[in-house]
Image (cartoon, helix red, strand yellow):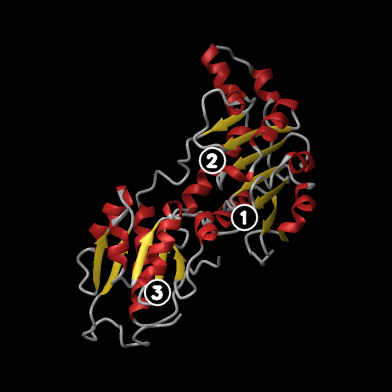
């Protein structure tokens, strides 16, 4: 990372001006960031978005935003801001817009270090357990006021000593893999480059996806969206899974071919699906997945429910802010 002032010259207590960070983010996280960081003497915090962003970035050292809001216009503003702007931090788990629009080479991109990974992993695991233990069928019978023991037994499956594939081995995928290992499952991981991961029994690069899926009774999707993963789980991939396999997706809806998944659910080859993300999103009225058998759909809320997520997110920003001011390499760097 090219430092404007060099290591130590931009450090806390040196008398140098505070780091100017522009926050292009509103809503809950925007308020939380201002409450936590606004009083720091080493930081000048500026909130700007839309047309005001170009002007605010001209004197900025850093930009804090969400990848989902990253656009061609924001890319242009960063490029026009010049070499002083050297750090972009994103809060989102996805990086498809960052990859699509690009970031100037002199800007280091970091991502919050898995602050909500445990919570998203809980949600993915909850959907899988609900499917495996037949809870949708039990809930339907309860609403009917029927003691449907035979129906419930027929819809119940065990995960013990089965094989799962986790597609995407970032912080969320690793957290999911550790949950699955606790159930006594064999866990295979698939990532873009097949880098080693202690949370799984074996790692495949993305070109080995079908080989891994052929062994899988469960597919858990935690990969980012983008051209490299669009419709990666298509009719061929779904057909490769073991019969009556379960599929959950908390990554991006674009990773699954929605119509192919609907067909696989209706044919019975896929035993159930849990979707926190869909394609399109939100899922429109009348889409076949609304009525697909044994399909649980939640409205992209897997990361919600834990106030501690915001604290962990802010801790990682403060950690990197202090490294940035000391001229040290940043942690949680995102390779695009």
Locate residue 55, reporting x and y percent. Answer: 28, 64
Of 176 and 248, nearer the camera is: 248
Secondary structure of the residue carrying numbered label 1: loop
Q: Earlier in the sequence, mark 1 or mark 3?
A: 3
User: Local crowd at mark 2 within 10 Å, few (<14), some, or many (≥20)?
Assistant: many
Give residue 86's mark. Answer: 3
Q: Is residue 223 visible?
A: yes
The Cα atoms of the two marked residues, 1 and 3, are separated by: 28 Å
Q: Which residue is mark 1?
A: 168
Up-down: is 233 above or below 132?
below
- Are the residues flagged by discs 1 and 3 in contact, CB closer than 8 Å? no
Tell me the quadrant of the picture where the C terminus can be found: bottom right
Dividing the picture into quarters, in which one does residue 140 lie?
top right
User: Local crowd at mark 1 within 10 Å, few (<14), some, or many (≥20)?
Assistant: many
The Cα atoms of the two marked residues, 2 and 3, are separated by: 33 Å
Up-down: is 332 above or below 14?
above
Secondary structure of the residue carrying numbered label 3: loop
Q: Which residue is mark 2?
A: 277
Locate residue 184, reporting x and y percent. Answer: 67, 49
Q: Nearer the viewer, mark 1 or mark 3?
A: 3
């Amino acid at each position: 990372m090219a430092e404007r002032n060099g290591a130590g010259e931009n450090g806390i207590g040196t008398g140098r001006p505070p780091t100017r960070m522009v926050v292009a983010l509103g809503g809950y996280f925007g308020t939380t960031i201002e409450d936590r960081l606004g009083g720091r003497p080493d930081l000048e915090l500026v909130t700007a978005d839309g047309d005001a962003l170009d002007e605010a970035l001209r004197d900025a050292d850093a930009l804090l935003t969400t990848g989902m809001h990253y656009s061609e216009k924001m890319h242009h503003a960063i490029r026009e801001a010049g070499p002083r702007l050297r750090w972009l931090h994103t809060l989102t788990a996805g990086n498809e817009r960052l990859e699509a629009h690009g970031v100037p080479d002199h800007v280091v991109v970091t991502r919050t270090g898995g602050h909500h990974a445990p919570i998203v992993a809980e949600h993915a695991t909850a959907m899988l357990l609900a499917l495996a233990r037949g809870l949708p069928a039990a809930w339907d019978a309860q609403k009917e006021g029927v003691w449907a023991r035979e129906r419930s037994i027929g819809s119940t499956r065990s995960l013990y000593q089965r094989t799962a594939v986790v597609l995407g081995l970032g912080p969320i995928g690793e957290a999911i893999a550790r949950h699955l290992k606790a159930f006594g499952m064999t866990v295979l991981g698939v990532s873009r480059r097949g880098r080693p991961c202690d949370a799984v029994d074996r790692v495949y690069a993305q070109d080995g996806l079908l080989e891994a899926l052929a062994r899988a009774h469960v597919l858990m999707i935690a990969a980012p969206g983008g051209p490299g993963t669009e419709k990666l789980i298509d009719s061929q991939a779904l057909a490769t899974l073991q019969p009556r396999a379960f599929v959950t997706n908390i990554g991006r809806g674009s990773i699954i071919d929605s119509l192919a998944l609907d067909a696989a659910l209706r044919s019975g080859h896929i035993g159930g699906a849990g979707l926190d993300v869909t394609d399109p999103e939100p899922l429109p009225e009348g889409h076949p997945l609304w009525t697909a058998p044994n399909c649980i759909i939640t409205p992209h809320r897997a990361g919600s429910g834990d106030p501690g997520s915001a604290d962990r997110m802010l801790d990682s920003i403060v950690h990197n802010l202090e490294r940035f001011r000391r001229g040290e390499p940043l942690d949680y760097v995102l390779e695009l």
